[in-house]
Amino acid sequence: MGAPRTLAAKLLGGVARLVPEETRDWAVAMLRELDFIEGDWAAFFWALGSTAAILRHAVSVWRGWLKQKGKKEAGMNNTGKKALGVGLGILSALALVGCLFAGLRIIGILFPGLGLEHSGWAYWLAVMAIPEAIFVVATVLLWRKKGPIAAGILATGLAMALHVGVHFAMR
Amino acid sequence: MKLRLSPQTLLVLDAFLDHAEDWKYGYDLSRVTGLKSGTLYPILMRMAERKLLETEWEQGEPGKPPRHMYRFTPDGLRFARANATAHASGRLGQVALGRVPLGLVKA
């Protein structure tokens, strides 16, 4: 076996070991063909062409793998964004209820004559009726463009309604 | 199942259509088509990926390393025959590449 053929076999053998599994079969196939090529230089040039073909294929396999990985990561990011949106919706809804409740308490303290501190309907209005109405309007308005936030607001509204329902049922 | 029908691809399809049922080897295809390994194998890989070709390792004599063989799948054969016009262009491609005399081009 001449030096060019030896070099060709070593080159293809080395490349076959380095490339990904999907390309290896092809690299080995090209390596096997070397035994049937007459002429050392012909074998050498066969190996050079084969190496180029293998590397191009390996690059396309790696590129495909990276693209798939990128898509998976993008999918995870989307899930994260949605979760963040839902969380934001819940926090906004709770903040609204908290603000209304605090506002009612402040008005009660500032204007004790109104008797809001002991008024059941005032609390029901501030903590339940007004927020629920706002939640419904906000959910309808935000559903298409800010779906996750709308879902968060809706979930909070439903939880509050359920809480109040259970509260009245227990009484 | 799209395959870009370059003149080189047409040459390969042409080579496979000759005794389509027989298994063929890479080096033999290279000699028949006149394509270098760097051109021939990417075409074979694409055809195999698109399930136009089936590949197998030839179980030769014991002690001898197996050899990779290729032949059309039924889909591949249909694809090649459906592109009969392209097949004719393949002959013309051979002419263009100076591998077949114009007189040998089938009508």
Image (spheres, coloured by chain):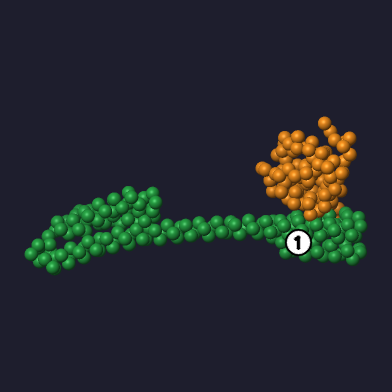
**Residue A82 in the image, given as x and y percentages of width and height:** 42, 57
Residue drawn at 82 percent across, 31 percent down: B107
Res. A21 in view = no
Q: Residue furthest top?
A: B107
Q: Examine the rendered structure and indicate whether residue A128 appears above or below residue A109.
A: above
Q: Residue furthest left?
A: A113
Chain under numbered label 1: A
**Residue A89 in the image, given as x and y percentages of width and height:** 34, 58
Q: Colour of chain B?
A: orange
| Figure quadrant of residue B38 | bottom right
Q: Regarding mark 1 in the picture, which secondary structure is present there?
A: helix
Residue at numbered disc 1:
A16
Q: Quadrant of the N terminus of chain B?
A: top right
- Counting labels gives 1
Residue drawn at 79 percent across, 48 percent down: B69
Residue drawn at 64 percent across, 58 percent down: A63
Residue drawn at 80 percent across, 64 percent down: A11
In-image side of A56 versus A97 (left or right)? right
Q: Which chain is green?
A: A
**Residue A43 in the image, given as x and y percentages of width and height:** 87, 58
What amino acid is labelled 1 in the image? Ala
